[in-house]
């Protein structure tokens, strides 16, 4: 494995691991529908929102450490995002394990019900792509609802927050096989690490920003599209629209203080860029995006 570390002024402290059973959440908002995709490489930057599962959360109490959501049920989206650029393809988050699509009734657990209509690889196939065709993979964070298919992309260049990467491959995570297994193969992938931010294509159209707190090295993605303008994908900085309104911090976040600092930083970035904010697990945001295989550009 070849690791390339991008130096930065800031270092992040590893935090306690997030309670692993809650594998929930996802996706986003959009207004402009592109034309039908072709199998050719992208000539402009395009954002595709792929359906990588749903999570029916029976009680969202854990989404606020202040009890703001106690007893409330929520249906969450769980998307993956493909950014097609003339210089290559970036996959942002990989959703729940796509074997879930083989179960017509999904998986039922005490905390919720997960389902999946179509596999990630089948959706990529509609664009004539296989995992081997994806040049870059990046995860907002390591949780299983975002890294469920990460191992399929071990041939891609893995762009990782350095703090998140260190935690992902720590002894603590290795001792939690259910959490570690989905992304274990990335350990030997070609890896490019950053600390504060990374400009994926070098032209400002896709910039990953460190926003820790949900996990030790959680990140968000800022896109600049020709027609749609700036778009911010939140990862799990916010889980629902109400999370943003209330600035709620989930009880299972690794660091509450870091989360609140990241919220402030995120809102400054959103205001500065006049970005459309896509809360990845917010079902209404996901439904407002162009339905795959249409795209935002």
Image: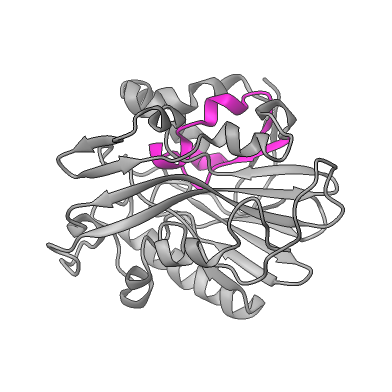
The foreground one among 272 and 78 is 78
Q: What span is colored magenta in the figure?
A: 135-164
| Residue located 74% across and 42% down the image | 89
Residue 65 on the magenta span: no
Give residue 58's position: percent from left, percent from top. Answer: 18, 52
The foreground one among 40 and 186 is 40
Give residue 148's position: percent from left, percent from top. Answer: 45, 33
| Residue located 36% across and 65% down the image | 240
241 vs 200, left or right, is: left
| Residue located 38% across and 72% down the image | 244
Indicate the quadrant where residue 167 lies.
top left
Q: Is residue 107 visible?
A: yes
Q: In which quadrant of the rendered image does the N terminus lie? A: top right
Q: In which quadrant of the rendered image does the C terminus lie? A: bottom right
136 vs 266, left or right, is: right
Q: Is residue 200 visible?
A: no
């Amino acid at each position: 494995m070849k690791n390339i570390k991008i130096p930065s002024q800031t270092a992040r402290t590893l935090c306690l691991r997030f309670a692993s059973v809650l594998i929930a959440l996802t996706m986003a908002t959009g207004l402009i529908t592109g034309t039908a995709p072709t199998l050719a490489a992208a000539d402009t930057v395009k954002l595709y929102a792929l359906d990588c599962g749903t999570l029916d959360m029976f009680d969202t109490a854990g989404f606020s450490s202040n009890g703001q959501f106690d007893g409330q049920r929520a249906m969450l989206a769980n998307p993956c995002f493909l950014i097609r650029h003339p210089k290559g393809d970036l996959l942002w988050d990989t959703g729940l394990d796509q074997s879930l699509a083989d179960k017509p009734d999904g998986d039922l657990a005490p905390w919720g019900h997960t389902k999946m209509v179509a596999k990630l690889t089948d959706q990529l196939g509609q664009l004539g792509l296989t995992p081997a065709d994806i040049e870059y993979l990046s995860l907002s964070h390591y949780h299983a609802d975002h890294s469920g298919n990460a191992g399929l992309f071990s041939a891609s260049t893995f762009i990782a927050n350095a703090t998140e990467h260190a935690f992902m491959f720590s002894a603590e995570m290795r001792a939690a096989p259910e959490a570690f297994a989905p992304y274990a193969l990335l350990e030997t992938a070609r890896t490019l690490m950053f600390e504060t931010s990374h400009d994926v294509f070098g032209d400002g159209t896709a910039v990953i920003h460190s926003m820790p707190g949900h996990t030790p090295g959680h990140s968000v993605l800022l896109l600049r599209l020709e027609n749609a303008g700036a778009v911010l994908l939140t990862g799990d900085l916010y889980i629902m629209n109400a999370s943003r309104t209330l600035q709620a911090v989930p009880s299972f976040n690794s660091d509450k203080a870091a989360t609140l600092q990241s919220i402030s930083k995120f809102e400054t970035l959103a205001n500065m860029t006049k970005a459309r904010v896509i809360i990845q697990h917010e079902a209404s945001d996901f439904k407002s995006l162009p339905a795959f295989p249409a795209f935002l550009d």
